[in-house]
Image (spheres, grey):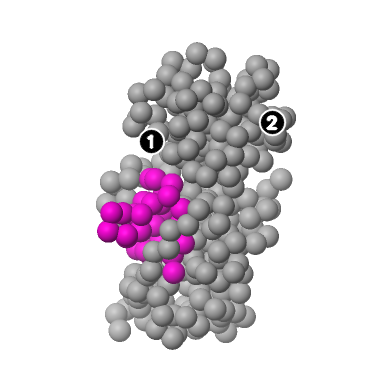
Amino acid sequence: MTLAKATLAASFAALCGAGATAGQLQDRVDAGEAIRLGFAASPPWAYQGDDGSAMGFVNAITIGVLQKMGHENVEPVLTDWSALIPSLKAGRVDVITGGMYVLPERCANVDFSDPIGAFGDAFIVAAGNPKGIATYQDLIDQDLRMATVSGYNTVADGRAAGVADSQIMQVPGPTEMLAAVRAGRADAGATNTIEARLLSEADEQVDMTDPAGFEGRKKQVVSVGFPQDDDAFREEFNAALQEYLGSDEMMETVAEYDYIPAFLPGDLTTEDACNAG
């Protein structure tokens, strides 16, 4: 056993002794079964490679940490964004990733790891932003329609800002959101800054609005989701994540997805995010 593994094993034993509970995920690992990694098609956060592998920087970080823990047997499971938390609760997957903001309502159903990054939101709009959209208030004032992915925080954030349900088009994924804006069925697409930048760079018919002018959610932490009965495994994951996050090895692994040091969470915590509001 390597020193790193021995240290982690000792930490794990100490955590168990401190009252951390072992649940279904730990039982599967102990039985030699694969860790089922659930994610939705949401590049560059998470998506499926041509060979069926789990791609995207959140998947890369998660798999990197699991490998540091000694877990090589990881099974990718692609699903819809709105099915991620239900799949975790139903035991169809063991871990969920993607650009999942840590929100109080999600914390009621998922136990999140320490943050893997912190990000903000923005709109995608028709090239040149002819309607001058920068905020949810602009949508309200001009009676405009926004598209966003079902289950994204932008659904609740838009409603909280006063956007009527009749102005919110919920779609299955970012591809459908982009299509709605391109076709004029929606005047804006509400999403996170990383996804907005990716979509706008890939399609000259849309632009990303200035995140600095977005009067919605400020920087929000993103974490990895675990079942609520697997405290011991999650805490062991956090211990390995603390060593891996921001390391040269990690930054080299996620460089292809344009994850930069500015995305590191710093002092932001999962606990504070769960208790926000």
In front of the other: 256 or 190? 190
Mark 2 or 1, closer to the camera? 2
Q: Is residue 211 visible?
A: no
In front of the other: 119 or 161? 161
Dot 2 or dot 1, earlier in sequence: 2
Give the amino acid at mark 2: Ser
Give the amino acid at mark 1: Leu
Q: Residues within 10 Å of mark 2 (few under 14, many from 20)?
A: few
- In the rendered image, residue 161 lying in the magenta stretch gets the answer no
Magenta segment, which residues? 36-65
Q: Secondary structure at mark 2?
A: helix
Q: Which residue is mark 1?
A: 198
24 horizontally vs 159: left or right: left
Query: Residue at coordinates 47% horizontally, 57% vertically from top-left?
Result: 79
User: Residue 99's spot in the image, x, y percent?
Assistant: 48, 49
User: Residue 32's spot in the image, x, y percent?
Assistant: 39, 83
User: Residue 2's spot in the image, x, y percent?
Assistant: 29, 80
Query: Residue at coordinates 38% horizontally, 52% vertically from top-left?
Result: 47
Q: In the image, is residue 143 above or below residue 199?
A: above
Q: Which residue is mark 2?
A: 166
The quadrant of the rendering that contains the N terminus is: bottom left
Q: Is residue 179 visible?
A: yes
